[in-house]
Image (spheres, grey):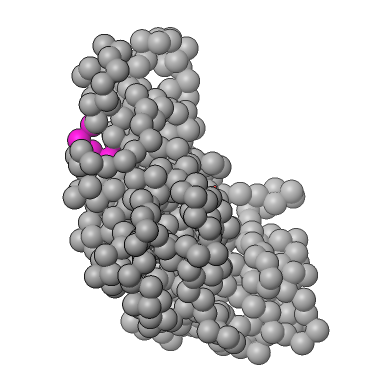
Amino acid sequence: MNKNFDNSVEGAQQLDQDDPLAFLRNEFEMTVTPNGDEEIYLVGNSLGLLPLAARDYMNAEINKWGRLGVRGHAETDHQPDHPWSTYHEIMNEQMASLVGAKPEEVVVMNGLTVNLHLMMVSFYRPNKQKYKILIEGHAFPTDHFAVESQIRHHGLSPAEALITVEPRPGEELIRAEDIAEQIEKHKEELALILLPGIQYYTGQVFPMSDIVELGHQAGAIVGLDLAHAIGNIPLNLHEWSADFAVWCNYKYMNSGPGAIAGCFVHERHLNRPDINRFEGWWGTNAETRFEMETVFDPIPTVDAWQLSNSSILSMVPIRASLNIFDLAGGILPLREKSEKQINYLDFLLAENLSEEIEVITPKALPERGCQFSLRITAQGKDGREVFHELEESGVSCDWRYPDVIRVAPVPLYNSFTDIFRFVEILKRILRPE
Ligand SMILES: *Cc1c(COP(=O)(O)O)cnc(C)c1O
């Protein structure tokens, strides 16, 4: 791929003109500064923008509730429409295609951390021999808390049962060979490996397929946290044979603050009578659900893990967002644009700010998504101050303790001009003439 770009605003505008996916930006509402100017929104890694269609979709369900009341569970009153009782099912195919799964392997339910617990209830069954969980040392805190509390729930201590893989001293990224080494070293006791698809702080993509393979060779279950991976990079959960995966839908999935999350269970674990599960009425056969019997008849899909009836109003934006992914032609064309945007931002930073900025995200495309983790190396500049100056200059990005500014050009709605303007602003902050 061409990595030589033109370091000018005209160059950026030309890239936008040549971009076959540029029209997708019009499907989103761009945020504005307190002065009413459009922001340069580079924080889709934290909260994706509002799909404009979500407003209509939301109104349609609100109106349906108003007109039909309880009948809305079974009836429809507008097109395209779906009764609430099966509303979650209409998203399965689109969601499955984004994670590379079969529709029966994915479900939209709960929050990410809740799903993580539900998955560990089923897939972390420690015994005397196999009881250890491998995570990364700098895992997102909720993953760490969930894992430690599951270990304690089984009467074990994290000191014995929790093992971690870390970057080597003086390094930022985790080496694949160090993951392999930890798996090998603990294989007799290893029960579960839980790693992210993309590390939230550095933006590093983990070698998911290899991890699943090594984990399975060690007789361990492999679960993936895809919070920063879904909607960002292509995924292939079914083929990789991951045992389970969880994700949230408010980051690259643009489905609103605290959006209902997603969950994947591999086909081979569906319909297993021996599986341990925390169960609820939304996991039992829908045909007999309202006979109010007390025999649990699990749905033969991942829906068996559902507990409560679906939160319809919180699911609505997911639908609007998934339709935009369809307009894009799926994740592959988006990734193609994303790679070009990654190369472009790399080029602009190297060309303009090589002394002032260090990119800690891996350099190779297969090892990174759209997020850049930037460390400020400019003399006399404090990273946190720079972050505040960016915000005051109309750039939305985020700060992650201890010293990283994260920016994520999202191919669904960020233009090449956004990227160019961002670097111009950063230059003004770091190199005032
Ligand atoms: C964003 C994120 C979460 C968020 O968890 P919630 O349950 O949705 O609040 C969890 N894990 C990772 C790795 C994340 O990046």
Quarter of the image with the N terminus in it:
bottom left
Residue 91 appears in which quarter of the rendering?
A: top left
Quarter of the image with the C terminus in it:
bottom right
Residue 225 appears in which quarter of the rendering?
A: bottom left
Q: From this view, report whether residue 97 is shown above or below residue 300.
A: below
Which residue lies at the image location 47% right of the left edge and 42% below the top edge?
114
Query: Would residue 433 be visible to someone looking at this image?
Result: no
x and y, in percent, of residue 306 in the image: 35, 33
Query: Would residue 177 be visible to someone looking at this image?
Result: yes
x and y, in percent, of residue 317 in the image: 45, 37
Give the magenta part as a residue range.
299-303
Q: Is residue 93 magenta?
A: no
Q: From this view, report whether residue 164 is shown above or below residue 76.
A: below
Q: Residue furthest bottom?
A: 355
Q: Is residue 210 left or right of residue 171?
A: left
Residue nearer the viewer, 301 or 127:
127
Which residue lies at the image location 43% right of the left edge and 62% below the top edge?
133
